[in-house]
Image: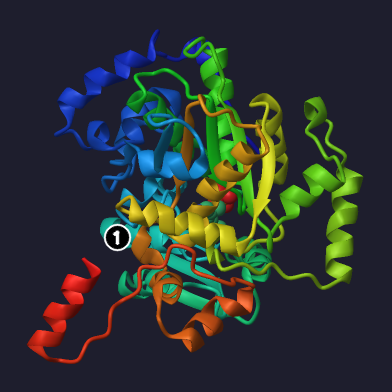
Amino acid sequence: MDVAYDWNSLPVPSHLREFEARWTQRRDPLAFSGIWRFHSLLPFAPPEQVVTIGEGQTLLQEANSVADYVGVKPGRLFLQYEGMNPSGSFKDNGMSAAFTHARMTGARRAACASTGNTSASLAAYCAVTRLMKAVIFIGSGKISYGKLSQALDYGALTVQIAGDFDDAMARVREVSRELGIYLVNSINPFRLEGQKTIMLRVLEALNWEPPDWIVVPGGNLGNSSAFGKAFMELKELGLIDRVPRLAVVNAAGADTLYQLWHDRRVRWNGGHPPKETIDEYFREMDERQAKASTIASAIEINRPVNLYKCLRALEFCDGMVCRVSDQEILDAKAQVGAGGIGCEPASGASVAGARMLRQIGAIEENERVVCILTGHQLKDPTATVAYHTTDQAKFNEVLGSRGVKRASFANRAVAVPNDLAEIVKAIQLYS
Ligand code: F0G
C-alpha cells in the first residue's frame, strides 16, 4: 500500500530552494522539524495534527578519510548522520509521520516488532507526547543494549518473544489486528513518507544537486523504498532532473534481497515482479529453517516486508544490490568511527558496500557518493568494544563466533601499572 497524492490540487513548490525560507521560521516546531519543513511533499496530515519531537536535525558530512577507504577522490564521499535524531536513528523520520497518522485515526496504542531502533523511536514518541502507549515486540537476545535500554527507560511495554525479528514481525501483525493496535513498522506506508525526507535533506546539503549514488543498508527495506518514492515524486513534479543511483547493501548473513536479485534475477519488471519465484524462495528458506545471523543486529532480517517497494525503487533508480561480510561491516564502521562521530554496525554496511562497489568498478572514483549512517555510534557499544579489545576471549565470544577474524583498525587500550613513571613512559611511547 502506498500513500498517493493528487499533486494537481496541492500547493507544491516550483523549486526545492523554496524550502530554505522555512529556516527563518525555526521557532515554529513544524519548521524546525527536518521532516515537517517539507510538509508540502508529504501533505497527508493537517498541520494541527502533526506530531514532532524535533527530529531530522541531521548532518551531511564530507568525509575524506572515509573517501580514501572507499576509494573515491577527496570531496566525493559524504556521510549522512541519521544517528543525530532524538532517539539516535533514522527511524524518527518515519515515526513522526506514522505517529501523526496514528493520532489522526484516534489510536490509543501503537505497536512494532523491532531489532531495536524502531522500538526506541516509538517508545520516545509515546513518552514525549503522552498521546499513546507503546507496545514493542523484540526477539530474545537479538537487540543491542543501547536500544533495549531506551525502550525500558522510556516506559514502553516490552514483549520479548522466544524467536528472532522475523518471528516477532509475524506475531505483531497478528496481535495488532486482533487487538486493534496501530502498527508502526515500515509495512505502514506513512513511515515511508517521513523517511523520504532523508533524501530531501541530502539534496539540500548538496545545494539541491543530486549525488551520483545513495548507498544504504538493507534490512526491512523501508529506507530504500522510501528513497525511491522520494525520487519518483521529485522527478514527477519536475523538482529534480537527474535521479541518483541507489545501492542497497545486505549483510551476508541476512541476504534475502541479494539472493533474489542476483541468484534468482528477481526484478520489479515494470510492476510485474515474479511473485512465484519470490514465494518459492521463502518456502525453501522455511524448509531449511534458515535464520538470519549478522553482527549488524539492526538488519538481521530474512523476510523484508518492503521487498516489492524496494524492487520498484531499484528499477527507478537504476539500482544495485550487494552484500558484505561482518568483517567488512566492522572494518568499515571502524573507519567511520576513526573519522569522528561514528555509527552502529548496520550503518557500517553502507560504507563497506560503497567500497565493494568501487572495487568492482560500479562506482567511479570521481562520482559523488552519499552513504547513509542509519544509527548512532552508542547504539551497540558491545560490538565496538569487542572490536577494539585486547581481550582475545571477549573478541572471540562476540565477534569470532560471527566469522570475524581480525580487527583491522583496532585502537587498543594500553594497560599500565598505577605508577606515574610507567604512565609517562607509556604515553611517550605511544603518542
Ligand atoms: N540501519 C539501522 C540502524 C536499522 O535499525 C535498520 C532497521 C536498518 C538499517 C534497516 O533499515 O529496514 O529500512 O532496510 N531496523 C529496524 C528496527 C528493522 O526494528 O529497528 P530498513
Front-most of residues 42 and 201? 201
* Residue identified by numbered label 1: 130
Does 290 sit above or below residue 83?
Answer: below
Q: Is residue 352 left or right of residue 56?
A: right
The quarter of the rendered structure image containing the N terminus is top right
Q: Give the x, y percent position of residue 323.
A: 67, 51
Front-most of residues 394 and 262? 394
Three-letter code for the amino acid on which mark 1 is drawn: Arg
Does 78 sit above or below residue 86?
Answer: above
Q: Residues within 10 Å of mark 1 (few under 14, many from 20)?
A: few
The quarter of the rendered structure image containing the C terminus is bottom left
Q: Give the x, y percent position of residue 209.
A: 42, 17
- Name the element at disc 1: loop
Q: Give the x, y percent position of residue 206.
A: 37, 24
* Among the 4 quarters of the image, the one containing residue 244: top right
Q: Specify whether residue 44 is in view.
A: yes
Q: How is the image coloured?
A: rainbow
Which residue is found at the position 31% from the left and 74% from the top? 153
Q: Is residue 351 left or right of residue 203?
A: right
Q: Specify whether residue 186 is in view.
A: no
Does 407 sit above or below residue 308?
Answer: below
- Exactly how many numbered labels are in the figure? 1
Which residue is found at the position 18% from the left and 33% from the top? 28
Q: Give the x, y percent position of residue 295.
A: 56, 68
Which residue is found at the position 48% from the left and 53% from the top? 347
Residue reaching furthest left? 420
Front-most of residues 397 and 72? 72
